[in-house]
């Protein structure tokens, strides 16, 4: 258990550096299996989810090294195609190994993935993608899934633009003997980054009129080193932007990509913050601004407002004058932060819309120091923002969720003048 101790009520002022994207890196790590030789992945953040996938790669027979912000993975001697629950239970992204293992071995056995408790996270679209793009025998049991067969190519129209299932389909499509078309796939920048990596591995994937497509490419192992750099973490950058505005501070988020952050930029501007994006940084000012709430913020797939910033946005809006409403259509049960934000002084509750959808109803005011417990990664981030805003001492208890997705979060907040420390409790 980690305890974050925060003496809040001070505006965050200064600059902060964005790390590489967790959600781009995780599937790319699984996709190193498709290169079959040495890969150097640059700008990799030190996160427990990343460590978990590296451990899984080593279990499968890969050699890995993590030095500075560079991960080296060599999957040329991979010798296993099974991943037990002991590995998959810790991280949702372990499902990313499905397609790469199938391409390498023609079979795999993967226990159901774990991850943050943010509502149901089935893998039915992943399996549908396999059925549509290949000739597979799929056996599911209470433990996980066993699959045998080959990718053939084909067409898959996704019922919903699931990020993970699109990534599974692209990895399968990459080295199929026939062309592939994936309609209604996810268009998140992390998916595009994976496509970039797959092309660097020798694939021919492209996006045309919002449809993912691939031309046949042969799979072959490589001996030369592939070097690839992951995109900046738009969710980490957005969390800092919301924290700066929530504390009525002024800051510059460096090494981010504002083009990927339009949802959060729109929200901050609508609330009355000053937000100016440049090529690779974002300036945010809440200082001396009267910030007001927003009628309805809805989290949808990219390019709309991201579900991963829904909880941090609730913390921000709880500091803005007037009423706000926040609805998450991607994970409609992802509201565990609401009661915890309430314990720290926010006037927030989960309400029901006339159509039956649950949403977060917020009446702006002030946080006070308090005690909250994080229930998932982004809920944890929202509580840190609440603690940084509230006058007095706050304690955020966390079972390791925050370290899954925020690199050096206390150091980064301290660099902005925040008073925040972490203690390990055993
Ligand atoms: N869904 C299904 N069936 C499936 C797959 C998804 O019903 O087979 C549903 C899910 O239950 C959910 C919705 O589709 O309601 C969206 O799920 P999606 O598959 O898009 O999410 P994911 O791939 O499991 C990734 C990120 C999440 C992020 C979502 C949405 C990674 C490792 N995780 O998850 O990130 O919230 O996309 O953008 O890339 C986080 O970083 O905190 C995080 C949870």
Image (cartoon, rainbow, N blue to C red):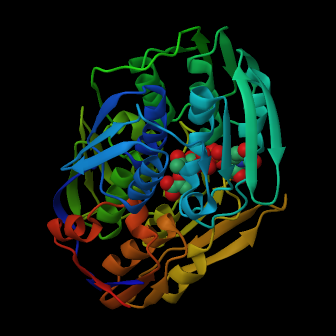
Q: Looking at the rendering, in which quadrant would you find the C terminus?
A: bottom left
Q: Residue 314, position in %: x, y?
A: 51, 66
For residue 247, side relative to residue 401 (left or right):
left
Question: What is the x, y in percent for residue 370?
Answer: 42, 91
- Residues 176 and 238: in front is 176
> Which residue is at a point 32% across and 62% down the rendered structure image?
245
Q: Is residue 201 left or right of residue 241?
A: right
- 135 left or right of 377? right
Closer to the camera in the image, 21 or 345: 21
For residue 86, say whether it is visible: yes
The residue sitting at 44% across, 44% down in the picture is 61
Query: Where residue 267 appears, x then y in whole percent?
Result: 46, 51
Compared across the picture, whether 183 is left or right of 196 comes to right
* Along the line of sight, the residue nearer the viewer: 280 or 126: 126
Q: Nearer the viewer, residue 323 or 118?
A: 118
The x, y position of residue 422, in whole percent, is: 28, 81
Residue at position x 63%, y 56% in the image: 113
Residue, x 48% and y 64% (percent of image)? 378
Vertical relation: 322 (above or below) 125: below
Residue 209 visible, this angle: no
Seen in the picture, residue 375 relative to 241 is either above or below; the reply is: below
| Quadrant of the drawing holding the N terminus | bottom left
Q: Examine the rendered structure and indicate whether residue 170 appears above or below residue 90.
A: above
Quadrant for residue 327, please give it.
bottom right
Could you say which quadrant of the image residue 160 lies in? top right
């Amino acid at each position: 258990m980690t305890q974050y101790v925060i003496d809040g009520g001070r505006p965050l002022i200064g600059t902060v550096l964005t790390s590489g994207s967790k959600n781009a890196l995780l599937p790319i790590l699984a996709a190193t299996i498709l290169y079959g030789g040495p890969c150097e992945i640059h700008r990799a953040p030190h996160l427990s989810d990343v460590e978990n996938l590296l451990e899984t790669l080593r279990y499968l027979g890969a050699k890995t090294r993590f030095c500075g912000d560079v991960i080296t993975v060599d999957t040329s001697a991979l010798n296993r195609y099974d991943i037990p629950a002991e590995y998959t239970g810790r991280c949702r992204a372990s499902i990313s190994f499905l397609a790469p293992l199938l391409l390498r071995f023609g079979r795999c056995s993967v226990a159901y993935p774990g991850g943050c408790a943010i509502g149901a996270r089935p893998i039915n679209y992943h399996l549908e993608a396999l059925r549509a793009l290949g000739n597979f025998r799929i056996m599911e049991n209470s433990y996980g899934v066993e699959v045998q067969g080959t990718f053939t190519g084909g067409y898959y129209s996704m019922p919903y633009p699931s990020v993970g299932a699109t990534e599974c389909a692209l990895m399968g499509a990459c080295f199929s003997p026939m062309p592939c078309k994936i309609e209604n796939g996810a268009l998140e920048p992390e998916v595009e980054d994976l496509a970039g990596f797959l092309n660097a591995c020798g694939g021919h994937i492209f996006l045309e009129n919002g449809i993912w497509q691939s031309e046949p490419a042969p799979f072959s192992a490589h001996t030369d080193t592939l070097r690839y750099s992951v995109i900046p973490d738009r969710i980490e950058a957005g969390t800092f932007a919301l924290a700066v505005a929530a504390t009525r501070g002024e800051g510059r988020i460096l090494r981010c990509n504002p083009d990927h952050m339009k949802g959060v930029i729109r929200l901050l501007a609508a609330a009355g913050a000053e937000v100016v994006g440049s090529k690779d940084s974002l300036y945010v000012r809440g200082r001396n601004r009267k910030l007001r709430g927003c009628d309805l913020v809805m989290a949808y797939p990219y390019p709309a407002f991201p579900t991963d910033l829904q909880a941090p946005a609730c913390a921000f809006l709880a500091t803005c004058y007037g009423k706000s409403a926040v609805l998450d259509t991607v994970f409609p049960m992802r509201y565990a932060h609401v009661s915890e934000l309430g314990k720290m002084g926010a006037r927030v509750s989960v309400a029901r819309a006339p159509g039956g959808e649950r949403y977060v109803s917020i009446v702006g005011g002030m946080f006070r120091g308090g005690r909250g417990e994080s229930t998932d990664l982004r809920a944890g981030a929202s509580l840190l923002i609440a603690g940084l805003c509230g006058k007095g001492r706050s304690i955020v208890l966390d079972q390791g969720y925050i370290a899954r997705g925020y690199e050096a979060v206390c150091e980064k907040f301290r660099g902005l003048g925040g008073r925040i420390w972490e203690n390990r409790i055993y």
